[in-house]
Image (spheres, rainbow, N blue to C red):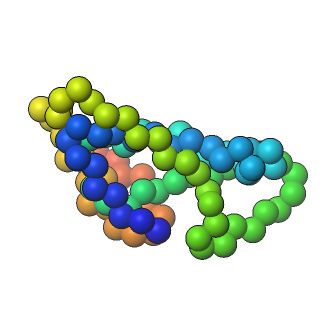
Amino acid sequence: MERFIFPDDICGHVRDKSSLARMFVSVLNTHFDPGFEGFATIEVINHGLRTLRLEAGDPLCQFVFSSLDEPTLYPYRGKYFNQERGPQEARYEEAT
């Protein structure tokens, strides 16, 4: 729901919320490089047997931010830079 703008000296990681992990729901622990901008796509897996309904705005994961000693010389400008809001499919690069 939030758009992220990572400065060139901050990176982030997505981590599970323990309340959901206790119900066997986890998120894939995505890394966000310094310089990433856009909406985060969070992959969610239900390892349990119960069907769970998550509503917009429900707490889903935790972000952990890390500060670099200095800004990176190569901020992220990859294929997911400035990605749109909503679920995003994998973007495969063409073989050259």
| Relative image position of residue 38 (x, y in whole percent) | 31, 60
Of all residues shown, which one is farthest toward the right? 49
The residue sitting at 71% across, 44% down in the picture is 18
Residue 58 in the image: above or below residue 35: below
Residue 94 visible: no
Residue 21 visible: yes
Quarter where residue 2 is shown: bottom left
The residue sitting at 34% across, 39% down in the picture is 11
Left or right of 55, for residue 71: left
Residue 96 in the image: above or below residue 38: above
The residue sitting at 73% across, 51% down in the picture is 20
Quarter where residue 95 is shown: top left
Of all residues shown, which one is farthest toward the left? 73
In the foreground, 13 or 47: 13
Residue 19 in the image: above or below residue 8: below
Left or right of 25, for residue 83: left
| Relative image position of residue 91 (x, y in whole percent) | 36, 52
Specify the quadrant that holds the C terminus: top left
| Relative image position of residue 72 (x, y in whole percent) | 17, 32
Residue 49 in the image: above or below residue 66: below
Left or right of 57, for residue 90: left
The residue sitting at 28% across, 55% down in the picture is 5
